[in-house]
Image: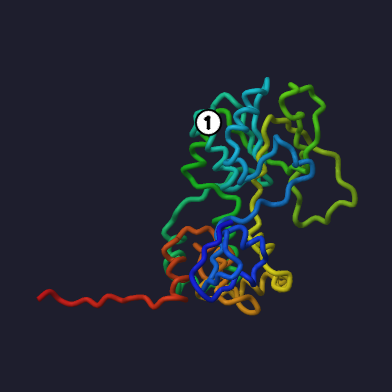
Amino acid sequence: MTWSCIRQRFSPSSIAPACRRAVNVPPKEQFDGVVVTGSGAPLPRLSGGVNPRVFDGHSFWLNLPQILSLLQNDPAPSVAIIGAGGTAAAIAHWFVREQITDIPVTVIGREATLFIRTSTPFEDRLFSDEAAWAALAPHVREAFVARLTRGVVWDYVLHRLGGANNIQYRSADVRHFAPTGAPTPSSTPPAIMAVLDHPPDPKAPAPATPPAPVGFLSAAVFVDARGFDAWGFTRLLPTALAGQLANRATVMGNIDYHLCVGAPFPGGLHVPMLASIQGPAAPNLMALGWMSDRILRRYVTPIVAKWRPAG
């Protein structure tokens, strides 16, 4: 999570101490606004996922030497990546880019396969035509953003994955992790496996008792890339303000032109990752110029150059 601060008037004293520590801000310094960007914190760990062999969409990139060490010290190294979206695909693509072709990599997702995300003029228009976006019904906007950003992989990445012989996809739901009981060298963590189930049916009621697992998957390294919590920043807010987030749909519906949440939150709290009502590029930072313009117009008056003929 990134906290960007713009001068005077937004007091960090109205934000929990964890926020002040995160940006090393003196308690009495004030700012006009705070911009919360980034994907947010990873989703809560699966049961049994507190293990040196399990990483998430953030920690994978921060621990590459440790991951390579786990693979090099395993007699039959393999990788399992949980998730069927862009984060999981980017991690799988790292193995392709690094030419690690002799280690099996299994991507596990709830969908039937990895779905492709490509660019078309019809979709691209909604990223630049603000009037066309505003004319859409709110639920249509939400469906558009979900269609383009959740459970899809850019075409270039997907084609690279498809050309790698060591990468496969498996449709399943990871219920939790469990020890395998297999012997491992004393210098490495105990071996674990993912306990698999059929992907849940959203139309069916939850079973009274969990069904028997449909399978197990062992790996030297697991990466939980199911996604991130865009609301994770609320943990840095005072309790009284965090309590105002119970109705998240209302909060998102009240995000203004400048990508700010409305009252009772302090003025100048910009949350682009929740601002799809203002534009489809906001949640995934696909148009940084557009986002910057929206935010900065709250604090400065744009200078409009006037054209004059030569001479």
Q: Residue at x 43, y 66 (%)?
A: 290
Image coords of residue 218 (percent x, y):
73, 30
Q: Please provide percent x and percent y for residue 266.
A: 61, 76
Rendered-image quadrant of the C terminus: bottom left
Q: Quadrant of residue 178?
A: top right
Q: Residue at x 51, y 50 (%)?
A: 117
Q: Which residue is mark 1?
A: 164
Q: Quadrant of the N terminus?
A: bottom right
* Residue 276 seen from this side: no
Q: Quadrant of residue 112?
A: top right
Numbered-mark total: 1
Residue 117 position (above or below residue 164): below
Left or right: residue 246 versus residue 208 is: left
**In the structure shown, which secondary structural element does the residue marked by tag 1 occupy?**
loop
**175 and 121: which one is in front?**
175
Residue at (69, 52) in percent of width and height: 43
Q: Is residue 213 visible?
A: yes
Q: Amino acid at mark 1?
A: Ala
Residue 91 horizontal side relative to residue 306, left or right: right
